[in-house]
Image: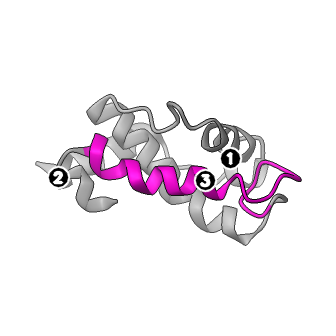
Amino acid sequence: MWASLKGDPFTETAPVLDYLENSLYKFDDGPFFLGQFSLVDIAYIPFIERFQIVLNELFKCDITAERPKLSAWIEEMNKIDAYVQTKTDSKEIVEIFKRKLV
């Protein structure tokens, strides 16, 4: 997905985001990748968080558009206090990526 930031982020990230969306449909006992909160969610959220911020702020691309499961997963992750405490400031993330992309 990182390479997509130098190309067309709309078309290049769509297959990966669609794959994540479809993966979230595999278990129906909760909004997380394995149904219930697990290490999979812990591993994925830092990357998805950054992509959501960067794609939205720099390219006006909403990664959750037409991806209700991904949207619900992000929403549920943001309810977990332990995760929220580790989030990086979105302005800082945008500035870092601006420097890398220019």
**Residue 73 image offset from top left, x and y in percent:** 69, 45
User: Magenta stretch?
Assistant: 9-34
Disc 1: CA contacts within 10 A as few (<14), some (14-19) or many (>=20): few
Is 3 on the left or on the right of 102, as rendered?
right
Q: Earlier in the sequence, mark 1 or mark 2?
A: 2
The nearer-to-camera label among 1 and 2 is 2
Tell me the number on the disc at residue 84: 1
N-terminal-most mark, 3 or 2: 2
The image quadrant that residue 11 belongs to is top left
- Relative to 11, does residue 65 appear above or below in the rendering? above
Task: Please name the residue shown 43% across and 32% down the image.
Answer: 62
Q: Is residue 101 above or below residue 78?
A: below
Q: Which residue is mark 3?
A: 22
Q: Amino acid at mark 1?
A: Val
Residue nearest the observer in this picture, 38 or 99: 38
Q: Residue at x 80, y 58 (%)?
A: 27
Q: In the image, which is nearer the foreground, mark 3 or mark 2?
A: 3
Mark 2 residue type: Lys
